[in-house]
Image (cartoon, grey):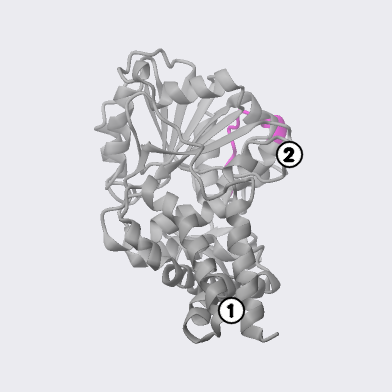
C-alpha cells in the first residue's frame, strides 16, 4: 500500500463519514427566524438588558444601536465604552435609544481579556432576569430580541446564541467568512451543543441571550477572565453547571464589520493556536489532517492510478457536498465550492502564524492590546504600562472575593 493510496483512503473515509455522521454538522437545521407577530416592535421587553461592549467602534455602533429601536418597549440597554480613542462615545450618545445607560470602562486589570472585563462591568449594571450580550458590530432585525426570549422560555434554554450572518460584500469576505462558519460548525456541531449530556459546548459571542441567574451562579466572568475564546468558554462553563444551550444561525442577526484579507487573517491568528491548546503536537496533527483531507484528494486525482483517482473523486464529491449547504444558506454562488481547498490551506497558514507569534511570547493581539504569554492574559497597551487594578463594583461580590479580587 503506497503512502498516496493510504492518504486518499483516509480522506475518502473521512469525508463520507462526515456526511453520514448523525450529528450532521454540515447541515443548517438550527435556523433562527423572527415570526411575524414579533416584527412590529411592540412587545414588552422590560425583563431584558442588552449589554454592548464597545471599543473603537465608531464605524458600526450607530447602526447597531439604531436597530434596537425596533426590538420592543421598555428595553434596557447598557453600553460599556471600553476606553475608545475614536468617536465611539459620541456615536453612542447620539443614538437616542430609549432606556440607554452609557458607562465609561475602567482600565483593564492584570489577568483580564478586554472584552470580558467590559462585559463584567456592563453586566454589573443589569438586574433583569435576562441579559443579551451583543457585540457592537451586530445588527438585529426587528423583533429579534423578543423572539430570542420566546425561544428560550418556550423550549427551556438557559442560553440562546446566534451566529451572526457575516458581512459578505467584498471578495475576501465571500471567500473566507463563509468558510469560517463552515469550519466552526464542523468543530462544534450545533446538534451536539444542544444535547445536555454531550461535552460539545459552543456559543457565538456576537449574540448570546442568557439567564442572569445562570451567569451569577457561574461567578460572572471573573473565573474565565483570561479566556481568549470567550464565547465557547462561557458555553462550556454553562454546560458544566447543567445549563442548556441552543446555538443556531440566522440571516436576521447580521455582522456589520467589513473585512479584507488582512483583517480576516488577524481575526484567525488571534485565537487559532489557542484553539489548539497552544500544543505543538495538536498543531502538527491539525496540519497533517488538513493536508490529507483538503489537498491529497486533488493530488490523487491528478497523479494516482485508476483506483486512487476514483477514491479521490469520491472524496472530493463528499467534501464539496458538505460545503454546499453553507454557500446555499448565505446565498453565495455554488461554484465557490471549488475554492474550499485553497481557502482551507490559507487558514492553515494563518494558524501557523498564530503559533509562531506565540513562540515569540505574544498570546494574542486585538484592538491595540497585546496579551503576553508570561502574563497569562495580562494586557499591555502599546507604550503604556499596565494599569493598576481597579475595584470591581461587582453584582456578585462573593464570587469576586473567591477569585482573589481580580
- The circle drawn on residue 240 is 2
Q: Please name the residue shown 70% across and 73% down the image.
A: 281
Quadrant assignment, res 160: top right
Of circles 1 and 2, which is in front? 1
Mark 2 or mark 1, which is nearer the start of the sequence?
2
Q: Please name the residue shown 34% across and 19% down the image.
A: 36
Q: Please name the residue shown 38% across and 15% down the image.
A: 74
* Residue 228 seen in the current view: no
Residue 346 at x, y percent in the picture:
45, 72
Identify the element where label 2 is drawn: helix
Residue 159 at x, y percent in the picture:
58, 31
Above-or-below relation of 293 to 50: below
Left or right relative to 9: residue 44: left
**Residue of label 1:** 307
Left or right relative to 211: residue 182: left
Mark 2 Cα shell of 10 Å, populated few (<14), some (14-19), many (≥20): some
Identify the element where label 1 is drawn: helix
The quarter of the picture where the C terminus appears is top right
Disc 1 to disc 2, C-alpha distance = 47 Å
Residue 189 at x, y percent in the picture:
59, 47
Q: Which residues are magenta?
A: 389-400
Quadrant assignment, res 252: top left
Quadrant assignment, res 352: bottom right
Amino acid at each position: 500500500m503506497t503512502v498516496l493510496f493510504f492518504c486518499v483512503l483516509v480522506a475518502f473515509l473521512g469525508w463520507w463519514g462526515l456526511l453520514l455522521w448523525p450529528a450532521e454538522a454540515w447541515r443548517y437545521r438550527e435556523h433562527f427566524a423572527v415570526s411575524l407577530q414579533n416584527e412590529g416592535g411592540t412587545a414588552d421587553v422590560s425583563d431584558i438588558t442588552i449589554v454592548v461592549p464597545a471599543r473603537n467602534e465608531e464605524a458600526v455602533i450607530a447602526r447597531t444601536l439604531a436597530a434596537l429601536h425596533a426590538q420592543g418597549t421598555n428595553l434596557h440597554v447598557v453600553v460599556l465604552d471600553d476606553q475608545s480613542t475614536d468617536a465611539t462615545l459620541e456615536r453612542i450618545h447620539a443614538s437616542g435609544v430609549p432606556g440607554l445607560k452609557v458607562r465609561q470602562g475602567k482600565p483593564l486589570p492584570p489577568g483580564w481579556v478586554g472584552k470580558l472585563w467590559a462585559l463584567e462591568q456592563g453586566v454589573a449594571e443589569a438586574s433583569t432576569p435576562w441579559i443579551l450580550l451583543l457585540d457592537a458590530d451586530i445588527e438585529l432585525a426587528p423583533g429579534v430580541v423578543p423572539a430570542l426570549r420566546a425561544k428560550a422560555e418556550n423550549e427551556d434554554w438557559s442560553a440562546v446564541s446566534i451566529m451572526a450572518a457575516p458581512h459578505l460584500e467584498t471578495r475576501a469576505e465571500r471567500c473566507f467568512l463563509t468558510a469560517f462558519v463552515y469550519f466552526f460548525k464542523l468543530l462544534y456541531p450545533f446538534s451536539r451543543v444542544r444535547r445536555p449530556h454531550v461535552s460539545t459546548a459552543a456559543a457565538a459571542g456576537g449574540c448570546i441571550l442568557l439567564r442572569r441567574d445562570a451567569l451569577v451562579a457561574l461567578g460572572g466572568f471573573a473565573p474565565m477572565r483570561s479566556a481568549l475564546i470567550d464565547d465557547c468558554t462561557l458555553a462550556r462553563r454553562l454546560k458544566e453547571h447543567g445549563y442548556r444551550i441552543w446555538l443556531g444561525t440566522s440571516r436576521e442577526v447580521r455582522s456589520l464589520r467589513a473585512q479584507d484579507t488582512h483583517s480576516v487573517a488577524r481575526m484567525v491568528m488571534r485565537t487559532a493556536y489557542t484553539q489548539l491548546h497552544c500544543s505543538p503536537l495538536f498543531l502538527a496533527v491539525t496540519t497533517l489532517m488538513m493536508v490529507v483531507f483538503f489537498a491529497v484528494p486533488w493530488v490523487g486525482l491528478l497523479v494516482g492510478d485508476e483506483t486512487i483517482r476514483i477514491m479521490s473523486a469520491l472524496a472530493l464529491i463528499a467534501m464539496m457536498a458538505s460545503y454546499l449547504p453553507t454557500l446555499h444558506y448565505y446565498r453565495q454562488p455554488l461554484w465557490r465550492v471549488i475554492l474550499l481547498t485553497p481557502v482551507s490551506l490559507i487558514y492553515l497558514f494563518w494558524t501557523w502564524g498564530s503559533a509562531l507569534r506565540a513562540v515569540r511570547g505574544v498570546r494574542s493581539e486585538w484592538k491595540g492590546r497585546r496579551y503576553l504569554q508570561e502574563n497569562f492574559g495580562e494586557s499591555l497597551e502599546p507604550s503604556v504600562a499596565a494599569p493598576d487594578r481597579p475595584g470591581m463594583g461587582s453584582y456578585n461580590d462573593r464570587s469576586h472575593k473567591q477569585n482573589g479580587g481580580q
